[in-house]
């Protein structure tokens, strides 16, 4: 296996042909195509979930989550990561520059809008969001659950990448199917410092959406000293669509919305 390191960028000079590879989206100019290469194990995971070529062919992703009696719908522009979350009482969005919030009635928004606007998308779009720029990969000790070991890949971010570059993830995968099985993650948004405590999600089952394997259910489990405990919260995803076209205007900030500082 190739030595794991920070993702490398290779410039390939081409004249008239296009290279079809399972790599991140190529940026083509007159004579140069930029191709990103990844460690062998995470490349296998991307392939098991439908491949980066399929992921990069899509423009928009929408999914729903049941919250009590209400449905929360999230839409994301996959290239720009503009987003829109709509609930019965609120609209929360990101227009590429600012996070905004619009109240539909007199109910106040409960939660941290700037923290939440892309949170569930990031969990839902695993493992493909781990092909983003500025990520470093290295091997991590396996996670053992019910006498089965899941190899791990540790993910960290270069300084200045995203709202919380101190966040760390460990993706655990099934060594036979190469599909993602568990995700350990830290939360540093509020402290802005590296954390030692990991939270743990089980990717319980998968569903095929436009050629991709995306999660149908996420289950949060207690996790301490490397031991996996009982399930706590569970989230199911419905009303999922993935498309190669989108209406860019849907992500614009409404006139009555306020910017979240």
Image: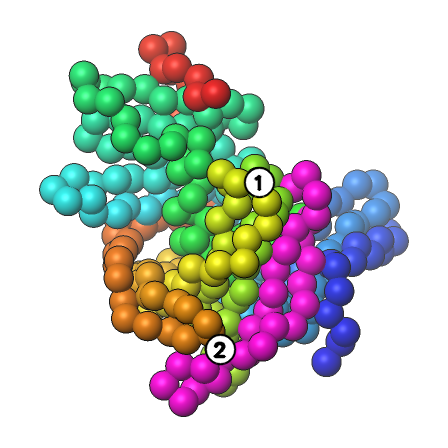
Residue 200 visible here = yes
- Where the N terminus falls, by quadrant? bottom right
Extreme residue in the bottom direction: 147
The span picked out in magenta is: 134-161
Cα–Cα span, label 1 and label 2: 27 Å
- Which numbered circle lies on residue 48? none
Viewer-nearest residue: 198 or 100: 198
Q: Is residue 40 above or below residue 247?
A: below
Which residue shows up at 49% across the image and 33% down it? Answer: 82
- Mark 1 vs mark 2: which is more N-terminal? 2
Give the x, y percent position of residue 143. Answer: 49, 77
Which residue shows up at 54% across the image and 79% down it? Answer: 142
Image marks 1 and 2: residues in contact by CB distance under 8 Å: no
Mark 1 crowd level (few <14, some 14–19, many ≥20, 10 Å Cα): few
Give the x, y percent position of residue 77. Answer: 48, 38
Give the x, y percent position of residue 121. Answer: 42, 46
- The stretch drawn in magenta includes residue 165: no
Residue highlighted by disc 1 = 192
User: In screen coordinates, is 223 left or right of 152?
Assistant: left
- The stretch drawn in magenta includes residue 145: yes
Q: Is residue 226 above or below residue 157?
A: below
Helix, strand or loop for disc 2: strand
User: In screen coordinates, is 253 left or right of 232?
Assistant: right
Viewer-nearest residue: 4 or 86: 4
Which residue shows up at 82% across the image and 56% down it? Answer: 10
Helix, strand or loop for disc 1: loop
Residue highlighted by disc 2 = 143
Give the x, y percent position of residue 255. Answer: 38, 10
Viewer-nearest residue: 1 or 230: 230
Extreme residue in the left direction: 69
């Amino acid at each position: 296996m190739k030595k794991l390191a920070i993702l490398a960028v290779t410039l390939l000079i081409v004249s008239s042909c296009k290279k079809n590879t399972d790599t991140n989206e190529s940026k083509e100019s007159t004579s140069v195509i930029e191709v990103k290469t990844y460690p062998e194990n995470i490349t296998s995971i991307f392939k098991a979930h439908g491949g980066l070529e399929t992921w990069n062919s899509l423009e928009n992703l929408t999914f729903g989550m049941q919250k009590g009696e209400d449905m929360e719908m999230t839409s994301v522009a996959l290239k720009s990561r503009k987003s829109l979350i709509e609930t019965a009482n609120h609209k929360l969005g990101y227009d590429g520059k600012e996070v905004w919030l619009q109240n539909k009635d007199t109910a106040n928004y409960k939660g941290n809008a700037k923290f939440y606007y892309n949170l569930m998308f990031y969990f839902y779009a695993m493992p493909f969001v781990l092909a983003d720029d500025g990520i470093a990969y290295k091997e991590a000790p396996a996670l053992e659950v019910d006498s089965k070991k899941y190899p791990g890949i540790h993910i960290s971010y270069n300084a200045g990448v995203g709202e919380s570059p101190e966040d760390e993830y460990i993706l655990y995968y099934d060594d036979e199917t190469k599909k993602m099985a568990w995700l350990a993650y830290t939360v540093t948004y509020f402290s802005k410092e590296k954390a030692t405590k990991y939270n743990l999600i089980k990717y319980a089952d998968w569903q095929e959406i436009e050629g991709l394997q995306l999660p149908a259910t996420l289950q949060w489990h207690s996790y301490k000293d490397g031991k996996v405990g009982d399930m706590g919260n569970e989230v199911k995803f419905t009303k999922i669509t993935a498309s190669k076209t989108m209406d860019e205007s849907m992500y614009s900030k409404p006139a009555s919305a306020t910017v979240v500082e």
